[in-house]
Image (cartoon, rainbow, N blue to C red):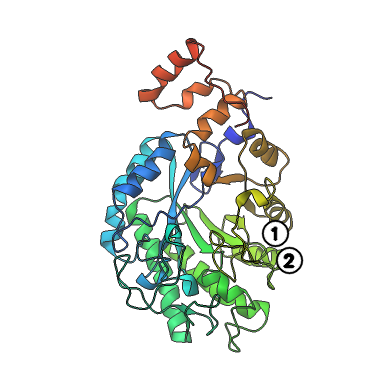
Amino acid sequence: MSATPQLFSPLTIRGVTLKNRVVLSPLCMYSADSGVATDWQFAHLSAFARGGVGLVFAEATAVEPKGRITPKCLGIWTDAQAEALKPTTRFIESMGSVPGLQIAHAGRKASASPPWDGGKPLPIGDTSWGDPSWEVVGPSAVPLAEGWQTPHAMSETDIGEMVGAFADAARRAVVAGFKVLEIHGAHGYLIHSFLSPLSNQRNDAYGGDRAGRMRFALEVTEAVRAAWPEDLPLFFRVSAVDGKGWEIEDSVALSRELKARGVDVVDCSAGGISGAPAFRAKDDGSPAKSGDRPLGFQVPYAEQVRTEADIKTMAVGRIIEARQAEAILAEGRADLIGIGRELMYDPFWTLHAAEVLDQENAQAGWPDQYRWAIVRRADLGAGATRPGV
């Protein structure tokens, strides 16, 4: 193993340098107050910065009130919401990490309860989770699943206003101090629902063939790139396949168009276009279990998009071990490693991975406030390394 594993090699994208290739994937916390960040967001995100993660993404952040998944989701449609995020971005940068924000609109999957309440659709006007729930929107009047709202089909005027909302969110993200921005175009949310022929049954310029179905995503990207500083990176998250009419070849074609419009990294996830949310049930109605999927099950999507669209990619999907992550990078299958649940389980995964990969002076990554004690712990023979991380 070289002194500097690929996982810990810096990566410069435009004017931003990441100290390593570990990325905290956006993780919804369902803990905001009318879209405003609370102490929970600070405590949650600061842990990963202290844990040495190179790029720390805040959760999916709504560009308008109706864009929230739940009434407790984070938003950035007001200046006050942007101001509330400043302490978090400042702290992340103080730890040598880069703060990132994912801007999103939940579309027809909005107005639901949090996952610990089953992620159920809420009746319009329900106040059990704070703000009253609302009418959902989408490309067509096609509900997510039985029991979910039939969305209001957006007019071309609605679409234009939504493109503007994404651009306004990008401008506020700059004010809030974020240095990387990601557009959420996956998991059945609004942009993905325009891409899929299952949810998009329009017969105008925003529907029909693949070019028409991609139009909204590309207009959002153009508007966001124009509003986002030229020297800061722009990511785009895709569901590389959804099993319902959008396949990897479509994602490659989309990625080429995104690259032409200034996207720097494609974040390759999958699924989510129809049926109950993944945390509720599988297609056959049985409980969903992450263990049903093999390690790195979505990595091939990142590899194919990277190769065929000639763009940087981020791999996600049950990447849980340091050597597994290192192999993905060393084999040229992706440029970044996105980790979610494993980092929630162990916010210091990155620092432990440095030890597992025998990075030279691995303990240097710990904050000063911790390092003196961590070094002493190792000297006492307490077993600082964690096989299998």
> Is residue 54 something one can see in this rendering?
no
Count of number-bearing discs = 2
The quarter of the picture where residue 370 lies is top left
Q: Residue furthest bottom?
A: 203
Q: Is residue 242 above or below residue 102?
A: below
The quarter of the picture where residue 228 lies is bottom left
Q: Secondary structure at mark 1?
A: helix
- Image point (67%, 53%), residue name: 298
> Is residue 319 something one can see in this rendering?
yes
Could you tell me which quadrant the N terminus lies in?
Answer: top right
* Mark number displayed over residue 309: 1
The reply, left or right, for residue 178 in relation to residue 242 is: left
Q: Is residue 358 above or below residue 263?
A: above
Give coordinates of residue 7: x percent, y percent: 60, 35
Give coordinates of residue 20: x percent, y percent: 54, 37
How far is mark 1 from mark 2, CA to CA? 10 Å
Q: Inspect the image, locate mark 1, and give the three-letter code of the amino acid beneath it.
A: Ala
Look at mark 2 in the image and give the residue it sits on. Answer: 249
Label 1, residues with CA under 10 Å away: few <14, some 14-19, many ≥20? many
Nearer the observer, 351 or 128: 128
Nearer the observer, 161 or 229: 161
Could you tell me which quadrant the C terminus lies in?
Answer: top right
Q: Residue furthest top?
A: 380
The reply, left or right, for residue 249 in relation to residue 71 is: right
Among the two numbered marks 1 and 2 on one chain, the one whose residue lies closer to the N terminus: 2
Q: Inspect the image, locate mark 2, and give the three-letter code of the amino acid beneath it.
A: Glu
Q: Residue furthest front?
A: 286
- Image point (62%, 26%), residue name: 387
Q: Is residue 90 above or below residue 216?
A: above
Give coordinates of residue 297: x percent, y percent: 69, 51
Q: Secondary structure at mark 2?
A: helix
- Image point (44%, 19%), residue name: 374
